[in-house]
Image (tube, grey):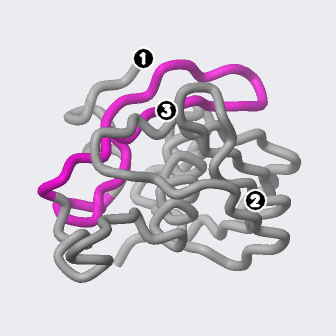
């Protein structure tokens, strides 16, 4: 398990764009983390004021951050690098994510060969899938 301080050592993201609160499990080919969705999130001010819903693109971003944590936490991970999105395909949203939800983020690594990571992601609330990503591509890049 990783807490938010350990996550911040791996990722450059900070409030309001750090979308991972805790890593629950890392296996040889997957990682599971959580994002606690609270009503005071910045994006709820405009999405939508009378019906707050977590934007789908931020659900994808949260999954991408989890993939980055996986890649950067590996024992053989290069130092002074970060991960950036390279592509996303086959996204499906099945249910809105609302304030008070705990988003469980699971990423399965399909292929990881520096500098490319190919993975799949699923976000769920109360064991019910809310977002599926068939393929995410990430690039490992040297930090400036």
Disc 2 and disc 3: Cα gap in Å?
16 Å
Q: Residue 33 carries which label?
A: 3
Pick whichever, 16 or 56, lies toward us: 56
Q: Provide residue 101's location: percent of width, then percent of height.
A: 38, 39
Q: Residues within 10 Å of mark 2 (few under 14, many from 20)?
A: many
Disc 2 and disc 1: Cα gap in Å?
24 Å
The vertical placement of 34 against 139, above or below, is: above
Disc 1 and disc 3: Cα gap in Å?
9 Å
Whether 34 is among the magenta residues is yes
Q: Would residue 43 be found to the left or right of residue 88 on screen?
A: left
Pick whichever, 49 or 77, lies toward us: 49
Q: What element carries label 3?
A: strand
Q: Which mark is residue 1?
A: 1
Residue at (45%, 67%) from the top-left corner?
58
Outermost residue, bottom side: 46
Pick whichever, 16 or 74, lies toward us: 16
Mark 1, mark 3: which one is toward the viewer? 3
The residue identified by callout 2 is 133
Q: Are marks 2 and 3 in contact (CB under 8 Å)?
A: no
Whether 120 is among the magenta residues is no
Outermost residue, front side: 50
Sequence order check, earlier mark of 2 and 1? 1
Q: Would residue 123 be found to the left or right of residue 11 on screen?
A: right
Q: What's the magenta region?
A: 12-40
The vertical placement of 113 against 45, above or below, is: above
């Amino acid at each position: 398990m990783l807490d938010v301080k350990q996550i911040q050592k791996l990722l450059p993201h900070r409030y309001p764009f750090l979308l991972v609160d805790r890593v629950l499990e890392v296996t040889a080919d997957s990682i599971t983390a959580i994002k606690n969705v609270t009503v005071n999130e910045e994006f709820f001010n405009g999405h939508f004021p009378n019906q707050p819903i977590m934007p789908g693109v931020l659900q994808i971003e949260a999954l991408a951050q989890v993939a980055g944590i996986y890649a950067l936490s590996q024992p053989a991970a290069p130092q002074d690098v970060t991960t950036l999105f390279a592509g996303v395909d086959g996204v499906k949203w099945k249910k809105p994510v609302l304030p008070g939800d705990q988003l469980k983020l699971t990423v399965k690594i399909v292929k990881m060969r520096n500098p490319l990571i190919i993975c799949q992601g699923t976000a769920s609330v109360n064991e019910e899938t809310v977002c599926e990503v068939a393929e995410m591509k990430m690039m490992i890049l040297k930090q400036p």
